[in-house]
Amino acid sequence: MIWRTATVITPFRIDIPQADLDDLNDRLARTRWPNEVADAGWDYGFPLARLKELADRWHTGYDWRKHEAALNELAHFTTEIDGQNVHFVHVRSPKPDALALILTHGWPGSFLEFLDVVEPLARDFHLVIPSLPGYGFSGPTHERGWDADRIARAWAELMRRLGYERYGAQGGDFGSGISTALGAAAPDRVVGVHVNYLPTRPDPDAGIDLSPEDEARLDGVRRLMANRPPYQALQSATPQTIGYALTDSPVGQLAWIAERFAQWTDPRSPVDDERMLTDVSLYWLTATAASSARLHREMVRATVPCPVPVGVAVFAHDITRSVRPLAERLYDIRHWSEFSRGGHFAAMEVPELFAEDVRDFFLGLPVR
């Protein structure tokens, strides 16, 4: 592979132009609301009253500058890899010989997912937290082909530039597939992969006797496969089309993301509205709705074997829950945890459980 750019790493500071914030506030003030049938609840989509509540808070009670200042307390950088700008946060552990971890988010998340686990994980690990190509401060992609394998190769190059010879990878949602792809792309450098989302599809040819609990999990997968979520169908088929609406309407972008947070989190550990609005603001202010949606189209691929040790954390309220006997047919499972709390955004919902499990897996691997 030939990288088409120099290996320059540049410090980066978040500084959204005031004109962009003024434009956001103006658009929110002029929102054109649809009607809603009586007693609709969630039957037709995101409830109008709840969305108006969130939009009003975004318009009148949310302070981007406060969150921007807090985010700038972290060390941000950008670099260009394979023709694409890549933004990342780099946090060094006080332990000079600590193992490095690269943490990868998914959609509709961002590097913000890991804010609450930076401090506990940095006690034992150097942390590299990139924004996916097409997301946030990495900016939009400009060509086809940014799938899991290409992103994994970019991550391997990023870690090489930072001087990490051996490191671990962690991810959820798209970050799960990218992390296992990284293990496959750089098995001599990746000591292990930890994921908090690992879909396991029904396999009638597996010849495995499954427990009633595992069969129930597979029934959930079958229902999901038979009733493909509308957002997924749109972003997989026509990401450009939905991108027009989301890039032009902040309330449209808010509803598109807030619905996922509402449906994918454990009701016992909801993500704070301020954190969610910061995530939505990141998509809006960087105009990356369309480019982030394209990843759903690019990510259609078969499972690639991951030859390095894998750790799995299963959270009770995730979209699907992994079935261990099926996962073990594909991966070298060394660590498996089941949690009674938490959902799809585990690092934000239950950061203490998430950080402890990540630490246990990587510190429990053989001497590197």
Image (cartoon, rainbow, N blue to C red):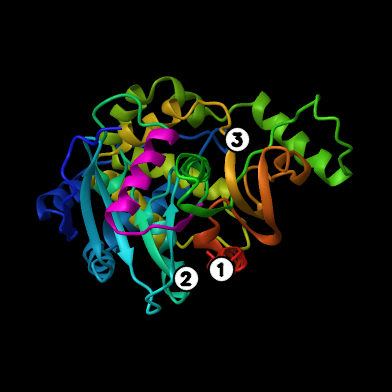
In the rendered image, residue 68, in percent from the top left (x then y), is placed at 24, 63
Crowding around mark 3 (Cα neighbors within 10 Å: few <14, some 14 to 19, many 20+) is few
In the rendered image, residue 351, in percent from the top left (x then y), is placed at 53, 67
**SS state under label 3:** loop
Residue at 45% from the left image edge and 52% from the top image edge: 189
Q: Say which quadrant the N terminus sits in.
A: top left
Q: Amino acid at mark 3?
A: Asp
Give the number of the disc on residue 54: none
Residue 181: tell me if it is visible.
Answer: yes
Q: Which residues are magenta?
A: 148-170
Most extreme residue toward the top is 237
Q: Which mark's residue is nearer the viewer, 1 or 3?
A: 1
In terms of image quadrants, where is residue 33?
Answer: top left
Name above or below for residue 166 compared with residue 288.
below
**SS state under label 2:** helix
For disc 2, the marked residue is 121
Residue 42: tell me if it is visible.
Answer: no
Q: How many labels sit on residues?
A: 3
Residue in front for this viewpoint, 81 or 307: 307
Q: Amino acid at mark 1?
A: Arg
Mark 2–mark 3 distance (CA, rounded to whole Å): 40 Å
Q: Earlier in the sequence, mark 2 or mark 1?
A: 2
Q: Are marks 2 and 1 in contact (CB under 8 Å)?
A: yes
In terms of image quadrants, where is residue 327?
Answer: top right
Quick check: is 161 in the magenta stretch?
Answer: yes
For disc 3, the marked residue is 43
